[in-house]
Amino acid sequence: MEQGKEAPDVDKLVKQFEESQDQGRENRELSERDRDYYDGYQLTDEEIATLQSRGQPPVVFNRIAPKVDAVLGFERRMRTDPKAYPRTPKHEDEANSVTDAIRYVLDDQRWDQKRSDVAENGFVEGAGAITVTVAQGRSGIDVILTHVPWDRFYFDPYSRTRDFSDAAYMGVVVWMDEDDVEAKWGEEGVKLATACLDSSDWSGDTYDDRPRYTAWADAKRRRVRVCQHYWRKAGVWHTAIFCRAGYLEEPAVSPYLDEDDQPSCPLIAVSCYIDRENNRYGGVRRMISPQDEINKRRSKALHYLNSRQVIAEHGAVENIGKAKEELARPDGWVEVNPESKIEIQPNVQMAAGEMQLLAEAKAEIDASGVNPALEGDVNAPSGRAVEALQQAGLAELTKFFDAQRDWGWRVYRAVWNRIRQYWDEERWIRVTDDENNLRWVALNKPVTVEDEVRKLVEAGQPVPPQLEQAFMANPQAVVRMSNPVADLDVDIVMQDAPDSVNIQSEQFQMLTEMWSKAPDRIPLEMVIEASTLRNKEQLLEHLKSQQQPNPLMERKATADVAKTESEAAKNFAAAEKDAADANATTQQSNVQAVQAHLAAEFGTPVPLIGV
């Protein structure tokens, strides 16, 4: 506890627990019934006995379980991953590291399975919870996610919000063996546990051990009920672990901090629906009445079909009991006294009426709660029509899906708060978002002078004189921390595909649509720059390198052009020489022909002018 403040008496916390169990006893019994209906236990012992006395099998047509499974299946399909967005543009890389860290914890803690368990508790019993705590691991402090079963979770009965944000207290009930108590709290814990062997006047059984007991301890098994209790005092969350006899761990301020560095409750709870009396219930409770009618109507119809009404005169048969037995048989034989009137009327019309009401009850349960399209039991002319029907069915479950989405966001936020608070040493996390490349991300990694110099040299940038002097003096000196989680300030959002994260994402979607229609008018670099891709800098560098001319290729191209031009000039000169030689040869031949003609004409050779 805080200095100067006295710890509350354990009776005060015990009264809070008993207040929760007493005021919520009736609703918990209904939640137990809802779970039984989902599991197929829908007939009471009296109803089963009645059916057996009629010779009818206790048959149940469970229409609830497929509907619940369909809803939970859609909840799994609609899940989204967390993503951290920076509050300033210069922290984008750090936000990516936060995203990697959160997803690493979720994968390590089998988040999907625990999320399914909470969703099932929420839709069947009406409420579910998970704790986000820490524990010492082999490589440091690990963030731990623990599913709290609905029958181990208790809370302030005056809370009215679905996220329990107005609850004055919440807690978890567990049963522990004496050996486990001794291993965790020593002899003092054992003394308190054994002191709980008193008679309790509590008559509820939801929070009992299995098998059930009605006291704070079981002497035969040496087991004791222990409460991990969280309560708000003066706006500050406190915690303690106690049994009926006293504190196993003394009250103290909650060690877990929120984003404002204030103590917070590690219990993250959610409920599906809340009525005006603050009773929390799930979607199953809305289907109980039509399910009961289905079972009853079918049993009635079967009973009518197996029964017959008889109208007879007094003394028509010698033994009425034997006559009834024969009439109940399909090949029964009844002897009637002479001149006695007996009339047998089958209950066909009454059975037909029950079957008609049975069909209406089936239609009612199909139309309420879960659209049949969600279960795949629908005939539609096209996939678009099926999708439209499914969307209509999902609209009826908006509150459930909204509650689950908000609960998931609060868990992500709590995971990040634990990381920010407890991961204060260098830590490497494995990231497998690229199926072809396994990479590692460092958190709280010291960056030395040598690291900075190497980074500048590899990038081809000059090393500042101050950094060069520091490198010469001490290359291993730490200049900064890479991804210091305690100093990162980010927003955790749900990366939800159907919805836009913010206006920027909406504008990016519009830009991509315009680019797809006119890729020659909108540069691809503009689309990549407006995106939130992690590796967009590498993509832009790659495109830039493809567009920038390579000096070696330029020189080679110039040489190829010069070679081509030289060869063309040589070929042109050779062609001109050949043409000149051919022309001279032709001209000489013409001169000789003329001289021969003149010699033959005049008898003597005649010189030609100009030749």
Image (cartoon, grey):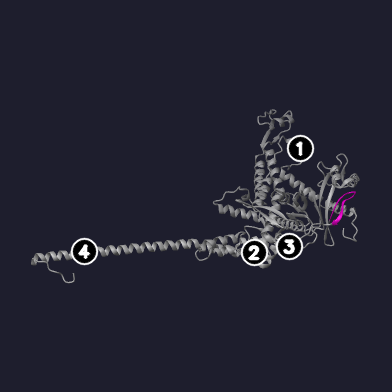
Q: 74 or 256: nearer the eye?
A: 256
Distance, label 4 to label 1, CA atoms, is 131 Å
User: What quarter of the picture does the C terminus occupy?
Assistant: bottom left
Q: 482 or 128: nearer the eye?
A: 482
What number is the disc on residue 502? 2
In front of the other: label 3 or label 1? 3
From the viewer's perspective, tell me whether residue 352 is left or right of residue 282.
left
Element under label 1? Answer: helix
Q: Earlier in the sequence, mark 1 or mark 2?
A: 1
Distance, label 3 to label 4, CA atoms, is 96 Å
Q: Earlier in the sequence, mark 4 or mark 1?
A: 1
In front of the other: label 2 or label 4? 4
Where residue 395 appears, as percent x and y from the top left, is 65, 56
Q: Earlier in the sequence, mark 2 or mark 4?
A: 2
- Provide the residue span drawn in magenta: 239-252
In front of the other: label 1 or label 2? 2
Task: Report the residue marked by disc 1.
Answer: 49
Magenta-highlighted stretch: main secondary structure?
A: strand
Where residue 454 appears, as percent x and y from the top left, is 64, 60
From the viewer's perspective, tell me whether residue 4 is left or right of residue 356.
right
Q: Earlier in the sequence, mark 3 or mark 4?
A: 3
Please tell me whether residue 54 is drawn above or below residue 596 in the rendered image: above
Q: Is residue 529 visible?
A: yes
- Residue neighbourhood size for the residue with mark 4, other residues' Cα within 10 Å, grouped as few (<14), some (14–19), many (≥20): few
Identity, as a three-letter code, of the amino acid under mark 4: Thr
Task: Report the residue marked by disc 3.
Answer: 487
Element under label 2? Answer: loop
Q: Earlier in the sequence, mark 3 or mark 1?
A: 1
Distance, label 1 to label 2, CA atoms, is 61 Å
What number is the disc on residue 562? none
Task: Report the residue marked by disc 4.
Answer: 586
Distance, label 2 to label 4, CA atoms, is 87 Å
